Image (cartoon, rainbow, N blue to C red):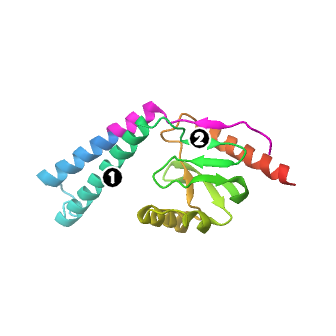
Amino acid sequence: MEDKESIEVFGSTGKLIKLLFFSILFLIVSLWILVYQPTVRNVIVNNFIIKNVASILGLFMGLFGIYFSTKKLFDKKPVVVIDAIGIIDNSSAVSLGRILWEDIDAIKEITVVNQKFIKIYLKNPEDYISKETNVIKRNMIKMNLKQSGSPVSISVNGLKISFNELKNILIQKFEEIQVSKN
């Protein structure tokens, strides 16, 4: 395809600051629960083991959110790039990077707990997964594939674009590529 046009989508500073704020809040609340061990009337929630495991998981989630949002706040590179070659996805910690149009089988919208995602289904997802050198990231990508049928999920949380706008751009470009191949 001769089209040299490239669409770059950057992170939204406002959305990332909001994510950072809630991550810090999550961390503080989890730490408070872990340190002060407040009692509640619910027998299950008041269980020592459940309370501590939930607090420790909350600490990790808060720390991960702080790390991810801070990293993205200071990263001036585009989060998603759509061009004639394919898509460059850097929207999450488990992004695959460059995805070629020829390797894409379908682009669909899915909703998980009121959160919309753009799922990009690959013809041979294992080809992309095997290129990942980080073992933890590779296992998380495999888990995404196993749970949803695709290792690629793009969320617009933290992006300067609406969900429908990004979805429509991706589908339109994908369809243009399909038509030009025939």
Query: Where 1 sits versus 182, above or below?
Result: above
Q: In which quarter of the image is the C terminus?
A: bottom right
CA–CA distance in space, label 2 to label 1: 24 Å
State which tag comes first along the sequence, 2 or 1: 1
Magenta stretch: give its range. 1-21
Q: Residue 106 placed where, x, y %?
A: 70, 57
How crowded pointer 2 is (Cα within 10 Å; few <14, some 14-19, many 20+) is rated as some
The one nearer the camera, 170 or 80, is 80
Residue at the spot 74% in from the left edge and 38% down from the top edge: 4
**Mark 1 residue type:** Met
Decide whether residue 4 is among the magenta residues: yes
Indicate the quadrant where residue 165 lies.
top right
Q: Name the residue under label 2.
A: 163
Residue 103: tell me if it is visible.
Answer: yes
Q: Residue 13 placed where, x, y %?
A: 44, 31
Q: Name the residue under label 1.
A: 61
